[in-house]
Amino acid sequence: MVATQSFLTLPELRRAAKRSLPPEVWDYVSGGAESETTLRRNRRALQHYQFRPRVLRDVHDIDLSTSFLGIPLRLPVMIAPMGSMYLVHPEGDVALARAAAQVGSVHWLSTMTHSAPEDVAAAAEGRVIFQLYFRGDNAWAEELIRRIEAAGFRALALTVDSAMYGRRERDLERRYDPRGVGNRVLNVPLDRGLRQTKLSWADVEWLKKTTHLPLILKGIQCAEDARLAAEHEVAAVYVSNHGGRQLDHAPASIEILAECVEAVAGRAEVIVDSGFQRGTDVLKALALGARAVCVGKLAAWGLGAAGAEGAARTLEILATELRVAMANCGVRRLTELTPALVRRVCDCR
Ligand SMILES: Cc1cc2nc3c(=O)[nH]c(=O)nc-3n(C[C@H](O)[C@H](O)[C@H](O)COP(=O)(O)O)c2cc1C
């Protein structure tokens, strides 16, 4: 057992994960599609936003709390859905769920899990959302939805950026298939998403009719689709390019966030992910209108470094970074945030 309090920075956790994970698992977690342009752009684009800090505002008491779809959050950060987490740590999603509960966050469970949804919901103390890859037929999806409703999941997120599985060349060149036994837990057809190539807005309507859970669309990447999502009355729009793992040369999430927030115009909650690895990154997204930010790789690295404790420590350090950034920007509450806090610049040195 690693003494997780000994981790003081996020890069330390990342380095510990890289040391302890097999190289092929590290690459599965950390890589992106094709030339990894989207992967890199997600990080680079964040550097193009600088703060416009305010001073002399009494920032002694900083409050990071908010909520997402009625779930109270002690920090505006959640754990993004990630498949095959058992490769990173034997406890996989159960460990991530425990970490989320410990810090007052939410864990999103991927369809590609190896853990029983009921165990994950219990470990998360109800702080769980289910991510759906629509791979089987409607009867398969309906059976799965009934199961996750009964297990106490709070919302259902349909991933819409994965019509076809992205070509992740790190995995391909290793002849490495990370799917393993993960998919079999929920009887996911291993067709590499044939059903997903046929998804349309009609399926969104079908899902809305089929579940009483709030519906989220994960993987929205432009204002037009954000507007359509709002018109279809989804509960939340999740701006994401899948952490650079799907379409290469996609826009960075931070660059399209504001246009999506504007298009939704308050009709749904808007959250974002892809490339967020620092408290300052989170603060930029919140200033540009996101209600919360999800982290994928960062949480997986924490899990790889020290299991549930490592993932929890990751979220704690992120919260500390956010608190310091808010104080030094003159912000006490998330409700005070507006786009006036950030300015986009060309020169990011
Ligand atoms: C190892 C790994 C597995 C993932 N698996 C899924 C998945 O099963 N379903 C899904 O919707 N997104 C999946 N994603 C994408 C994440 O939900 C999220 O969009 C992305 O990781 C955010 O970018 P970040 O890693 O830069 O934080 C996965 C990401 C990673 C890193």
Image (cartoon, rainbow, N blue to C red):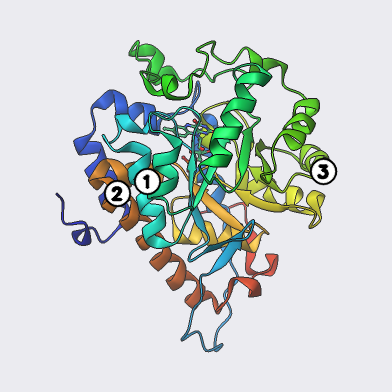
Residue shown at 75% from the left, 37% from the top: 208
Q: Which residue in the protein does label 1 denote?
A: 96
**Does the image show residue 16?**
yes
Residue shown at 74% from the left, 47% from the top: 260
Residue shown at 51% from the left, 17% from the top: 167
Q: Position of residue 150 (x, y in %)?
A: 55, 41
The residue nearer to you, when weighing 8 against 202, is: 202
For marks 3 and 2, the one nearer the N-term is 3
The residue nearer to you, when weighing 238 against 167, is: 238
Q: Of the numbered discs in the image, which one, if any, rests on residue 308?
A: 2
* Amino acid type, callout 1: Leu
Q: Position of residue 216 (x, y in %)?
A: 67, 42
Residue shown at 77% from the left, 29% from the top: 206
* Amino acid type, callout 3: Arg
Q: Of the numbered discs in the image, which one, if any, rests on residue 285?
A: none
Q: Is residue 205 above or below residue 253?
A: above
For marks 3 and 1, the one nearer the N-term is 1
